[in-house]
Amino acid sequence: MFSFLGIYYHHKAFNLEPGEGFETRGTELAGQRLALDQIEAHITSPSGYFFDMRKKREIIENTTTEEPLEESTYDYNDYGKEAEAVEEDLNDVCVQYYAIGEGIPYLTIDPMAKLIFEVSSIEELNVYKTGENAEKFYETLLEKLEVNFTGAITLKGAYFEQKLTLFRKSILPDVLLGGVSLLLVLICFLLYSRSFLFTGVILATVLLSLTTAYAIYTLILALKFFPFVNLLTLVLMVSIGADDAFLLLVYLREEKRLRKPGSQHFILTSSNSSLEKPMVSRTELLRASLPHSLISMFVTSSTTCIAFISNLSSPVIVVRCFGIYATLTIAINYILVLLLLPAAMSLTQCGPRNRYSNQLKRLLFEKTDGFYEKAASRVSAWIFKLRYLGLFITLLTAFVSLYALLVHPGIQLPESNPMQYLRSSHPYEWFDDHRPFFCFEKNRNLRHTINYVRGINPNHDSSSLNPFDEGVFSFSGVNLTTVQKVEELQDSAHLLRDLNPDFADRTMWIDEFLEYIGKNACEDEDNTCCTNTTIDEGCFLKYAKRSFCQEFPLPFRYGPADCPLFDKEKKLKAYFISVPSQQRLSLAYSKTKALFKELHTVEEGIKAKSGGDVYLLLSESHVTKMYDLLSKLLTSTMGSVLVSVAVSLVVIIACTWDLSISLLSITAIGSVILNTLAAVVWMGWRINVVEATITVLSIGLSFDYTLHYAVAHRHAHDPCIELRIRSCNNSAGRAVLAGAVTSILAGLPMLSARTNAFYQIGCFMIVISLLSLVTGAFLFPSLLAVCLDLRCWRRKNVKIEVY
């Protein structure tokens, strides 16, 4: 009921819009950007006070008499002749397109395909750009192009302005692929448990974990934003639910096997060994098996929760939201497993079996169990013999992974395509990845804009979990009451203007204003603005009516601009300076990084001349948003990794009370993390919001298998390391192998996903499962065998048999 209420009353919190919430909060640039976005709604536009308050007499008095035009003659014989093209003309985009027919011969163009459209009216011109017709038209067109262009000529890229539309259309089918993953895992459970009831309880546990977490997320925490990245938790829960359920079943069956009549069940202690009577009651079986499995489950669940909750240190909204929801889901799943699965095992696994179940067991499991025991014995013996080789492989892979992460190819941020929503092989994404080759950015004259605003407070009270809550806009006020203060502002304007040498001699509005109050205002009938000391703030408005100000903010500028800003009551509240920088307009991270580096070089000079006033210093809003996101993403992700590993070490020590095992566990887990990140780099992925989220997700999963072996090793009663490795493979090894198989099965359907997020999580599930399995089953025992000085008790009476 609680889950139903959360979904019923807060279903609108689902937000599948691409890019929504892909922004930072709590950073300096984020506060300035949010304030810049709200300026226009709180100021009076220049036209509002230039035309509304200007009297007709002022217009007439300020109208200058035009000088008579000089006579000129025209040679009509020159009509129709074009000027000779020069090299500089090639920098213009229009000239490049015009070169078709001029630079490219018509004999080459004639055999090319051509389309001619007849448009009935200008309103119908964009019929194939938006709407349902556009989706069908461009989808069909792209399919036909891909089918027809194969072989020597293949279609690589396309741009129809339909990428976001295709993402919205593809996200829900990809979520259904998560249902396919769940179905495959449930089939594995059904075959292994031989019980529909137990499989149904596992399904209920997974679904209740997801829905109850959503109810707490929306009802109790009152969060109004649920990004599509949170849907990745479905695939995560399939893997974790499988791991916990297999762990419980394996330990129960191992205990049940040891308690069979005729089996040799020894409980070795430090003082003696004795043979216990077989335990057959359900209660005793559960009591004997649950301590080992529940401790291992607690360690893995708590470390996974720590890995996810560490995302709260990230300034990115969607990463924080994912961390909260994933943590809630894992915690609730652990509680439900404690409440439901032991009871379900008591009903389905501890009692007598019917003849059909026994036949299935003989057909599927008896031979498999025998084969596994023999294989585990052989593998355990070889692991101990080759323990130094295992140590060498661990060190070698760690070194190679570090080289790949830090040197070549290195962790890279996206350049021309900062937001990848579809798979990289899709033509839409290929075009965006290579956009600079087709958009002529190198030949554009547009530059990034540097915006300096004095007198406005950054919005530091915005929500860190809701992109729609941008905080409260407020003016801090600007102190321009003296000529000295205005001259300091003039110095700031010149400092920013001179960043681009092309505008070094451009006259600014503040220059004309100082000339006005020093000379021209003294000639007016109302000469109250004629001053050399103090300035009345009304003089700014008075002169703004004479010298028209440019609008602010604008997406880009062709030249420097500055002017005072007045609130809705037409009172002076702030002052802006907006100038083109030296960096060409581009969303590539390297270009925006150079832009903000340029800002940092002048910030000290700007700060010294600000006179103590609060100011904003940033670029365009969307450029600042993208730069702040990418610049903080990598550091925050690595910070989350370090925090989760450090806190997890404390949890492991508290649960095992063995510092040596804990340190070796963290070493093995660190190896898995390094190898996983290196695999990401070798696959050519760049770290974006989705990749950062999945990276933290995979780090949470990298703890599990190694910790299962660590807990099993800690609670093993065998007298020496060789026997402990064999015992761990017989108990925890079964659960780890089963969990790895089901995690790989959960990831396989995701490989057919169209959206980048679900495709990448499928790849991650497969990679992290294989790496964790190899590390937990082979490399971690090798570390234990080498580093722990365990001597056998009663060595003469202990013998390892290899079948």
Image (cartoon, grey):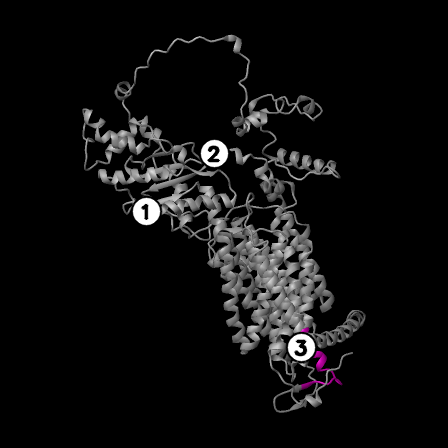
Secondary element at tag 3: helix
Secondary element at tag 1: helix
Asked whether residue 256 is drawn in magenta, I would say: yes
- Mark 3 and mark 2 lie on one chain; the one further toward the N terminus is 2
Residue 725's tag is 3
State the residue position of label 1: 607
Label 3 to label 2: alpha-carbon separation: 66 Å
Range shown magenta: 250-266
Marks 1, 3: nearer the viewer: 1
- Above or below, comparing residue 103 to residue 303 in the picture: above
Q: Quadrant of residue 64?
A: top left
State the residue position of label 2: 446
Taking the image as shown, residue 555 lies to the left or right of residue 493, namely right
Asked whether residue 775 is drawn in magenta, I would say: no
- Mark 1 and mark 3 lie on one chain; the one further toward the N terminus is 1
Residue 552's tag is none
Secondary element at tag 2: loop
Q: Can you give x and y, in whole percent of width and height, for residue 40 in the image?
A: 38, 37
Residue at the image point whose x is 37% and y is 11% from the top:
69
Label 1 to label 3: alpha-carbon separation: 64 Å
The amino acid type of the residue labelled 3 equals Ile
The amino acid type of the residue labelled 2 equals Leu
Q: Can you give x and y, in whole percent of width and height, for residue 425 in the image?
A: 66, 45
Residue at the image point whose x is 46% and y is 59% from the top:
313
Category of crowding for the residue at label 3, using alpha-carbon neighbours closer than 10 angstroms: few (below 14), some (14–19), many (at least 20): many
